[in-house]
Image (cartoon, rainbow, N blue to C red):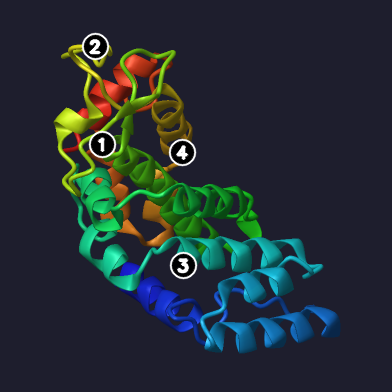
Amino acid sequence: MKYFRSCIKWVLGLSVISACNLYTPFNTNTSDLDKLEEAQKCLNDEDYICAIQQYQEIKDTNLKNQKLCQAYLTKGGLKLEDLVNTLNKNSGTVLSNLAKELMPWTPSRSEDFDTAQTHCSALSASMGSDAIFLKTVGAFTRCAYRMAKADVLKGSSNSSCNLTGLSDGLLTSSDIGGDGAGALSGANPGMCKTDVDTCRSDMALLSASELTSAGYTDLAGAIGKLPAGITNSSTDTVRAALRGTF
């Protein structure tokens, strides 16, 4: 239930994007309120760049990070149905399912999700359960989109990332690639090292206990079902674990 309340907040606060704030501190100054109002006018026209420019001028750090986290996730193309269809499933296939929902991969959308995660991960614990939810969404989304990149661009070793993928809009464990241990070669190309390492960093931010305490039991359960090795120090081991999410 808690998860769906957050999804409703997502629809009202982001979606396309109306005027409900996940977080509005009591001490928000007039200048920040003005920026929120101006940003809302931009969002009413679905002008995310304009809204982001307004959010960047907000002085309250938590509010600024929260709004930019949401705005960049939405600008990148994350939709309510992506959240409902994937992140609320207590399943070990959350990452691969979300990656498929977010395809196709483009550099500009990847940059949006990178920026979103910068702001999502910076949210203060003072925001409570909303911070935990957005941090989790940001981490899952960026990692999933890095997985989607393997449909377009792959590596034949951990020092290369210049092989053209099938770009067929279909993502399978073969796209993540590598041999049984996740090692790349000319015969077994796959997900580039920088993308695998990004997933490791994002997955390391997730806390099943925090999510459980905040009431997000499905998300907590999904984290518990991620393959062993997904935060391992070895890139190949993490790649093999990502293959195991299909």
Q: Residues within 10 Å of mark 2 (few under 14, many from 20)?
A: few
Dot in front, 4 or 3 = 3
Q: Residue at 84% across / 85% down in the picture?
A: 30
CB contact under 8 Å: marks 1 and 3: no
Circle number at residue 74: 3
Please provide percent x and percent y for residue 45: 54, 87
Distance from Cα at disc 2 to Cα at disc 1? 28 Å
Q: Is residue 220 left or right of residue 168?
A: right
Distance from Cα at disc 1 to Cα at disc 4? 13 Å
150 vs 211: above or below: above
**Tag 4 residue:** 202
**Tag 1 residue:** 226
Q: Residue at 30% across / 52% down in the picture?
A: 104
Q: Secondary structure at mark 3?
A: helix
Which sits earlier in the primary sequence, circle 4 or circle 3? 3
Please provide percent x and percent y for residue 71: 55, 68
Q: Secondary structure at mark 4?
A: helix
Dot in front, 2 or 1 = 2
Circle number at residue 186: 2
